[in-house]
Image (spheres, rainbow, N blue to C red):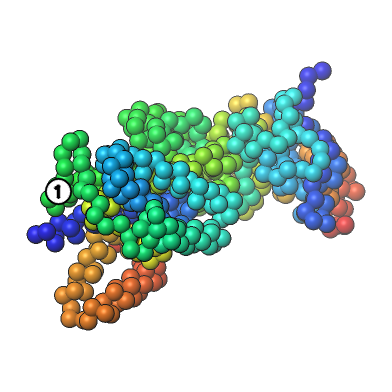
Amino acid sequence: MDFLYSYIALAEIYVLLGLSTNLLVGIAGIFTVSQAAVFGVGAYIVAYCLMHDVMGFVPALLVAAAICVVLNVLVTLPSLRVSGDYFVVTSFGIQLLATAVFVNWTAGTGGANGLPGIPSPDVFGYQLESSHQLVLLTTVGSALGCLAFWLIMRAPFGRLLRAIREDELAVAAAGKGVLRAKVSAAALAGAFAGSAGGIYATFLSFVDPSSFDLDASILLLTMVVVGGARTLAGSVIGPFLLLALPQVLSLIDIPTSIAASARQLIYGVLLIAFMLFRPQGLAGEKL
Amino acid sequence: MSAPYLQAAGLEVAFGGLRALRDCSFVVDQGRITCLVGPNGAGKTTIFNAITGFLKPQQGSVSFKGRILDGMKPQAIVHAGIARSFQNLRLFQDLTALDNVLVALPDMAGEEPLGALFRPLHAHRATGRRRVDALEILEHVGLVEKSREFVRNLSYGEQKLLTIARLLATGAELLLLDEPASGLSHGALEALMALLRRLQTEGKTLLVVEHNTRVVQKIADDVLFLHQGHLMARGTPEQIISDPALAEIYFGGAI
């Protein structure tokens, strides 16, 4: 049963990340490939705070979310000047930069070895140790994320973001502030990704740079594309489906040495196939 | 004497070596329909861009009701009371007609994330009220039956009416329309001209780029004739159309 719990918990953490990516890429049209970097920063902050007894889990999560809000606004700022294809390249650079920091800043991140032995989370005095307690935490976290996403989508703010994705000039001509709305979307996405990182660190009790590299960012994009852009359902279906893939592969008898690369291959094929044949994903709209 | 309603003075705009506007000056009077005519490349759309803050003239100044607009962002100019449409419409294709209008309504509650997240009921109720306003605007341009249609499912004529609905939603009093009549069928054209007249009686001032001389004759109170980025003549439609020199420029394709 522990296996099922850990699958659910991990998928729910990725739901938060999927929401974050969907908000930026799907709804606001800011095509970022660096959400995993923000995710990583959230994870390292919470790991550091808990390992060094700086503060408890909940305040650490809030601090991580706040820092990721600022960080994501900063890394998204180029999108206000350069659009479309150019921003993808900028964002790509930011992701590589972040990975370099995660790998090389040994004092803060443990370098390539990562940070082992992150304490389990405490929530209002309760220490969450068992796997079903942790699943409760990830479920509450992702449910709050889904609620926030739903509220945004049905509010005028969501409509404004969709309009911006379609035509920024027309939004400006309608008397609305494009800059402000884009910064707000980036801030929200940062809060989502940072919280996901914090929960991820305590859930695995170990973090290393490989969870937050370019592959992870592309996995997030694949989740949004396969699940479906711009919808809540798409952001939930994508992570659950794609994270089930490694388990399905483990049922097939292939050597472990090629299992990881086979997974990457399948993710890539899925991404291309969906873009070509079903751009709206399983439960979404065309990206 | 009070300040002119809209005044452009000595506008200069150059794109590289091309001088799109040269010492361009004119006045638009309140409550009138002013048509901006001239051959292709005369600078008509550039004037719109310069007035609404989409581009910054190298020289010259635009003032509206005595207020200098120079250096203001498009957003601020809309709030000052001037809104413009685009020749290529620029509607939000994946939104419904109603949502296109709602996006342009000012002072919308829940249009920033904190309001949307922490005061959802307030935002929801406010949206309900604004929906009524938006439907009224759609009714006004004759699109209320199409409010739930996505833009891509509307006919071209309906899309053109929707751009006007979106302008009305901003609450601006001076509307700049870029070729609202082009590509319309006869029936749609009549409906459009009637709508523009109606907007005038309701207190809007219109500055309209128009190529169709029949439309200009029917709706214009004043005509501004633009040639090579400079205001060449100003008058009633009859005066402008009966001037052989202008006709030569307009129809003769003279440089």
Residue where numbered disc 1 is placed = A129
Looking at the rendered structure, the number of numbered marks drawn on it comes to 1
Residue located at (67% from left, 44% from top): B54
Residue located at (24% from left, 69% from top): A245
Q: Residue furthest top?
A: B1
Give the SS element for disc 1.
loop
Question: What amino acid type is highlighted by mark number 1?
Answer: Glu
Disc 1 residue crowd, few under 14, some 14–19, many 20+, Cα 10 Å: few
Position of the N terminus of chain A by quadrant: bottom left
- Residue A3 in sight: yes
Q: As drawn, is A52 to the left or to the right of A98? A: left
x, y percentage for residue A194? 36, 48
x, y percentage for residue B85? 62, 43
Subunit under mark 1: A
Pick whichever, A191 or B252, lies toward us. A191
Q: Is residue B122 above or below residue B43?
A: above
Q: Is residue B48 above or below residue A32?
A: above
Q: Residue furthest right?
A: B245
Pick whichever, A245 or A224, lies toward us. A245
Position of the C terminus of chain A by quadrant: bottom left
x, y percentage for residue B149? 41, 48
x, y percentage for residue B139? 47, 35
Q: As drawn, is A18 to the left or to the right of A12? A: right
Residue located at (31% from left, 40% from top): A54
Q: As drawn, is B20 to the left or to the right of B78? A: right
Q: Is residue A269 above or below residue A236?
A: below
- Residue A185 in sight: no
